Amino acid sequence: MYRKKMTVLVILVVCLTLVGCSGMSLSTLSALSKLDPLETHPSELDLAVAVPDEIILADQGAVMRFAFKEQDKEDFIIDETFELRVLPMVTEQVSMVEPDQQLYHAKIDPDDWQRLTSAQQAVRQKRSDGIKGSGMINIQMTQLCYRQTPPDILPFRTFIRTRETGKFVPLSKQEDLFELLDQETSQDLRLAFQKCDPSDIDNRG
């Protein structure tokens, strides 16, 4: 059985505030410069996460957070979370995926399209009113397990595709999740990891 394991994976934002942006190629930066998360219709937003083959991500094992806060303020005034539909996909469809990694394709449920559209409109209205601020798109893996051996490291990479980019482009360089977290959180995460049930492996391959 899948159980909730992780609450933070990586912040996915446009390159001006993206962690690891400096390590990206010029072609990737060019593709990201075309991305406008406030104008992209939810149906045209495709996300992907690459994790080790040893890890299995549940079919509803990730969520996306869309948030906006005013300049010099700590609290987000727009903050929505959307459950993602997650399915394994062929790694050859995305460049820069390691041979020993599994790629998962994630999309927002159509039932949530209107809610995301409303959140996008709310941010556009703030900007139209002259309110300065910053926004983010954040993916969180929430339900995953390991096949045989608890991982010592958990390298991952994230990707996005919209009509503007035309293909999946990376939103982060490859990082070890355990290294990104503080020591206490990382240790809690290692202890929380559980071995997959046989049914999980049969259903997700």
Image: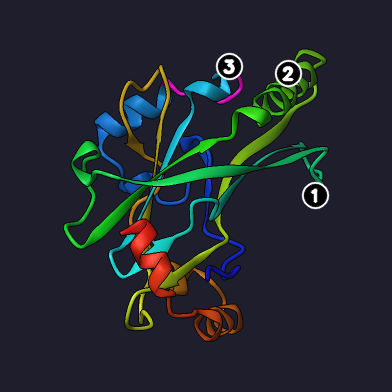
Answer yes or no: do the residues labelled 3 and 1 have beta carbons within 8 Å? no
Q: CA distance from mark 3 to mark 1?
A: 25 Å
Q: Where are the magenta residues, as a range? A: 34-38
Answer yes or no: do the residues labelled 2 and 1 have beta carbons within 8 Å? no
Q: 93 or 120, which is in the foreground?
A: 93
Crowd tier of the residue under label 1, counting other residues whose Cα lies within 10 Å: few below 14, some 14–19, many 20 or above = few
Q: Position of residue 128 (x, y in %)?
A: 76, 13
Crowd tier of the residue under label 3, counting other residues whose Cα lies within 10 Å: few below 14, some 14–19, many 20 or above = few
Amino acid type for the residue under numbered disc 2 = Gln
Looking at the rendered structure, the secondary structure element under dot 3 is loop
The label nearer to you, 2 versus 1, is: 2
* Disc number for residue 39: 3
- Residue located at (38% from left, 58% from top): 203
Magenta stretch: dominant SS? loop
Q: Picture quarter containing residue 135?
A: top right
Q: Is residue 122 visible?
A: yes
Q: Position of residue 186 (x, y in %)?
A: 53, 79
* Disc number for residue 121: 2
Q: Is residue 4 magenta?
A: no
Q: CA distance from mark 2 to mark 1?
A: 21 Å
- Residue located at (82% from left, 47% from top): 75
Q: Picture quarter containing residue 78?
A: top right
Vertical relation: 181 (above or below) 134: below
* Disc number for residue 74: 1
